């Protein structure tokens, strides 16, 4: 029986009178029923051998789905594909069916409703996973089609027939509703799934892992293996989740192990390296390096590296070197054990050193950009390998230090080496010179004996001298700054090497440096840079900072070197101290430069009386105090420690006491202000005036109060002891002890309140330590013997009594200050009262004068009164004793012959004050009448 007729009998035409929605539902059910019939036909034991019927119905099914599979049918399609894959083993006729079905899979999946994407998401995930499982079919055509279909997921678009509604079978617009054309009507409302929908679900499937694992079965199919690598490259470059899936299947290890298999095209190694790069960039780098660190992978990379090294273009070689560098960062890598590291070190010293090693015997360098990159990558591997002791032994055997010293030499010193036809260009040589200096800064401290034996110090100082000289033929590398002829980059790296060597604190090496005059050389470079008109940048500031640190390391523990530092070094320090802290937060590094300058004072000046006296004579203490008053709190500790050391010199104390800042604040006032700010930051219990608020805890900070219930081991310092080094109070107390606590200039009552605490700081600290001991004994359940317990109690009581006496003293200071303020206030009010009284007298005198000059009758009356009260003349020779008492000056007026306001001349005179009822005192006979004073009655 024909299968097509059977289908028509079971699915008669749907009457036209039914609603359209029901019509479509019946058609959908019919198609699903047909799919189930196909599955039953393939699986039923009675029809399992009807190969012709299978092929016929499968072809028909694929023909009706040639525009794509419906989302809701993917579950059944996957089952059909799995059945066909099983039949392919015995019946190759099913191969074209599988290939055509997989070709349809490359098209977008179709949906009838927008909700189908969410509804059938799990079916899509399982379908994609089944696609990968089809790689078990050994037929090359099937595998190739699977790989091609997956690759097409990333470049697939909807077919034109689906978008314009054309029937894919008849190539015309559907016009009827017969049963033979029902799928054409359905295609009118089918839409492709959203762009990216299939790719998102692919990331949740097992397809990437399955494709990766199938590589092991493609040893005899190199063409398909190459296509599979291309597909894996696309998968790994497009999604982080795909990289995670590949790594979960140990994809990095598998790719690495198969990258050296025979390949006629020569593309396998390139594709494999690209996949590894994608896994490193988009996946977990630590997981990738862990998978590549096995002995098998390292050997595979070694083989691949030397294979690529034989090619003229070293781009692939450089990519492999980067992967090797990442592996070298893994402590568990086996680069040294596999002897790969030894070969890389030999290549790193080529062509600077002549060697008979067969690795470099046939190696030809074109001195191109790729060769330069390879050389720099090989040099960078030296730094990565230097963390292992075995690698340092390897460096010594292969003479790495001489090779680096050869690279770092100035051009004039290495012109003989560059005289051959094949050589690095000037720019390339500078790149390698800077690279060699960077590596020496890391390796030289680890191989000091080898470095010194190779005259590394002399080479470094010669290079430093070359950096100072002007040379217009060098300095055009991208690493340099300042344009052509600038050697700032070389000087920066050279100083860094010096800093790393001196930081090793090997006295013989540091003495060798000093014997060769490095102190004066560095001071000259530093002052020369300061005199330069060029604007400061990050690099120049770092150079200055490193030079100061080198000088501090050299002079810290040697008196003779401090003498070599001398007046020139003191002038350098004073120069940087005068800059102050205005640019502390500039972001260029001035904050670090300030700290290194203070460290220079500590290490290079303090302790040597010659340099100390010169520093004091140049007002160095004043500059330190200026810096202390203007700098942020993060540098106060270093400055105070330096001042404390300087105060051991008796000549320094007068400088400290006589110092004043721009606002007139003295050094004791500044120290007490810093004490209050420190206690405020520590949240010490204080009242509103800064006095002791809790006599039982006069110094305890809030942090210490939280730790009072903790017990510490005997070898661990307690909080009370650690506090001495963690804040400024101990340093401020020590400085004030050297200055003294009496007759300090420029202190207010607020300062004296704080000073009373500072003076008793040591007593309070001792009591705090004993209180801590008592608390820890109590926490540990230890009861002291009676005498010890009594002594502990007495000590704690004495400390509390001392705190109470200090609190009483502070209250007395505040009361005395309050009385002084009250007396000052009364005096001020008295002065104000006298001033207003004087103004009233002046006003009355003026009114009297105006009334006399404006009213003639009043003038006559006053004149008559004066005549009547004028005293009789006394005999000659009688002394006259005036009895007038004056309290101030009053305005008087004098008339002249001029007209108008110009005829009135004002002047100051003195007016007497009379009590009530007292007669006015007239002017003396010698004074003219218009100049006489006017008495004012109360």
Image: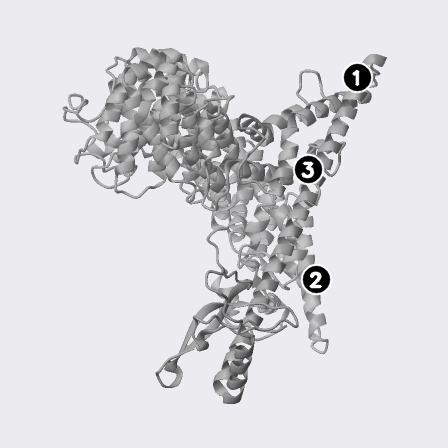
> Which of the pair 902/343 is nearer the observer?
902
Which residue does the numbered mark 1 point to in the structure image? 791
Contact (CB < 8 A) between labels 2 and 3? no
Name the N-terminal-most of marks 1 and 2. 2
Say what secondary structure mark 3 lies in: loop
Quadrant where the C terminus sits is bottom right
Q: Which mark is residue 684?
A: 3
At a point 65% along the width and 38% down the height, the residue shown is 753
> Which of the pair 649/511 is nearer the observer?
649
Callout in the foreground (1, 2)? 1
Label 2 to label 3: alpha-carbon separation: 84 Å
> Which of the pair 913/499 is nearer the observer?
913
Q: Quadrant of residue 686?
A: top right
Q: Position of residue 296 (x, y in %)?
A: 48, 21
Which residue does the numbered mark 2 point to in the structure image? 29
Q: Position of residue 529 (x, y in %)?
A: 28, 35
At a point 63% along the width and 64% down the height, the residue shown is 112
């Amino acid at each position: 029986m024909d299968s097509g007729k059977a289908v028509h009998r079971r699915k008669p035409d749907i009457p036209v009178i039914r609603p359209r929605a029901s019509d479509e539902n019946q058609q959908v059910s019919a198609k699903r029923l047909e799919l189930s019939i196909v599955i039953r036909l393939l699986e039923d034991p009675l029809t399992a051998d009807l190969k012709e019927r299978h092929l016929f119905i499968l072809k028909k099914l694929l023909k009706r789905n040639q525009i794509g599979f419906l989302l809701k049918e993917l579950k059944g399609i996957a089952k059909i594909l799995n059945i066909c894959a099983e039949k392919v083993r015995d019946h190759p006729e099913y191969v074209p069916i599988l290939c055509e079905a997989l070709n349809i899979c490359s098209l977008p999946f179709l949906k009838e409703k927008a909700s189908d994407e969410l509804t059938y998401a799990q079916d899509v995930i399982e379908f994609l996973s089944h696609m990968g499982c089809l790689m078990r079919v050994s037929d090359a055509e099937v595998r190739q089609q699977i790989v091609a279909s997956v690759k097409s997921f990333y470049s697939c678009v909807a077919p034109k027939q689906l978008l314009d509604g054309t029937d894919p079978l008849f190539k015309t617009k559907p016009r009827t509703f017969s049963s033979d054309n029902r799928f054409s009507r359905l295609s009118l409302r089918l839409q492709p799934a959203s762009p990216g929908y299939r790719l998102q679900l692919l990331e949740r499937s097992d397809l990437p892992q399955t494709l990766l694992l199938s590589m092991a079965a493609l040893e005899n199919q190199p063409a398909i293996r190459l296509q599979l690598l291309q597909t894996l490259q696309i998968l790994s470059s497009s999604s982080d989740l795909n990289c995670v899936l590949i790594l979960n299947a140990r994809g990095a290890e598998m790719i690495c192990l198969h990258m050296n298999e025979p390949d006629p095209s020569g593309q396998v190694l390139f594709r494999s390296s690209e996949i590894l790069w994608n896994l490193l960039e988009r996946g977990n780098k630590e997981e990738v390096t862990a998978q590549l660190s096995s002995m098998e992978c390292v050997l595979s990379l070694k083989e691949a590296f030397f294979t690529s090294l034989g090619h003229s273009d070293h781009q692939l070689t450089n990519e492999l070197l980067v992967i090797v560098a990442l592996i070298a960062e893994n402590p568990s890598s086996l680069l040294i054990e596999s002897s790969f590291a030894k070969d890389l070190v030999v290549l790193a010293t080529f062509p600077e050193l002549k060697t008979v090693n067969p690795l470099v015997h046939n190696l030809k360098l074109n001195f191109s950009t790729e060769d330069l990159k390879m050389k720099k990558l090989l040099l960078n591997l030296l730094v990565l390998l230097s963390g292992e002791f075995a690698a340092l032994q390897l460096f010594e055997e292969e003479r790495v230090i001489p090779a680096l010293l050869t690279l770092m030499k100035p051009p004039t010193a290495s012109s003989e080496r560059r005289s051959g036809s094949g050589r690095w260009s000037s720019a390339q040589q500078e790149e390698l010179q800077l690279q060699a200096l960077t590596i020496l800064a890391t390796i030289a401290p680890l191989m000091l004996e080898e470095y010194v034996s190779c005259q590394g110090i002399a080479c470094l100082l010669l290079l430093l001298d070359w950096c100072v000289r002007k040379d217009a033929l060098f300095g055009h590398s991208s690493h340099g700054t300042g344009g052509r002829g600038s050697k700032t980059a070389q000087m920066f790296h050279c100083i860094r090497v010096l800093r790393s060597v001196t930081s090793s604190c090997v006295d013989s090496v540091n003495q060798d440096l000093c014997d060769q005059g490095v102190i004066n050389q560095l001071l000259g470079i530093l002052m020369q840079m300061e005199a330069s008109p060029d604007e400061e940048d990050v690099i120049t500031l770092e150079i200055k900072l490193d030079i100061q640190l080198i000088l501090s390391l050299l002079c810290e523990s040697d008196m003779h070197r401090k003498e070599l530092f001398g007046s020139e070094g003191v002038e350098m320090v004073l120069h940087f101290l005068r800059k102050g802290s205005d640019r502390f937060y500039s972001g260029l590094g001035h904050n670090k430069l300030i700290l290194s300058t203070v460290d220079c004072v500590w290490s290079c000046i303090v302790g040597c009386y010659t340099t100390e006296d010169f520093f004091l004579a140049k007002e160095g203490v004043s500059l330190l105090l200026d810096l202390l008053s203007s700098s942020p709190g993060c540098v106060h500790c270093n400055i105070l420690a330096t001042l404390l050391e300087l105060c051991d010199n008796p000549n320094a104390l007068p400088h400290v006491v006589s110092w004043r800042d721009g606002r007139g604040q003295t050094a004791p006032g500044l120290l007490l202000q810093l004490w209050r700010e420190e206690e405020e930051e520590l949240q010490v219990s204080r009242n509103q005036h800064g006095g002791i608020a809790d006599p039982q805890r006069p110094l305890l900070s809030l942090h210490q109060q939280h730790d009072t219930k903790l017990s510490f081991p005997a070898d661990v310092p307690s909080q009370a002891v650690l506090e001495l080094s963690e804040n400024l109070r101990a340093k401020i107390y020590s400085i004030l002890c050297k200055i003294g606590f009496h007759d300090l200039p420029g202190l207010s009552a607020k300062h004296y309140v704080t000073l009373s605490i500072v003076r008793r700081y040591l007593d309070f600290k001792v009591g705090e330590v004993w209180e801590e001991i008592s608390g820890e004994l109590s926490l540990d359940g230890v009861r002291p013997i009676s005498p010890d317990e009594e002594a502990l109690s007495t000590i704690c009581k004495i400390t509390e009594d001392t705190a109470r006496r200090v609190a009483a003293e502070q209250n007395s200071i505040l009361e005395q200050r309050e009385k002084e303020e009250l007396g000052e206030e009364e005096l001020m009010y008295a002065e104000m009262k006298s001033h207003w009284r004087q103004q009233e007298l002046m006003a009355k005198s003026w009114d009297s004068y105006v009334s006399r000059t404006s009213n003639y009758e009043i003038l006559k009356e006053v004149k008559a009164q004066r005549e009547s009260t004028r005293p009789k003349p006394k005999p000659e020779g009688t002394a006259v004793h005036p009895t007038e008492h004056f309290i101030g000056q009053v305005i008087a007026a004098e008339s002249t012959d001029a007209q108008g306001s110009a005829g009135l001349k004002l002047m100051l005179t003195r007016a007497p004050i009379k009590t009530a009822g007292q007669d006015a005192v007239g002017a003396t006979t010698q004074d003219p009448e218009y100049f006489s004073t006017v008495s004012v009655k109360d």
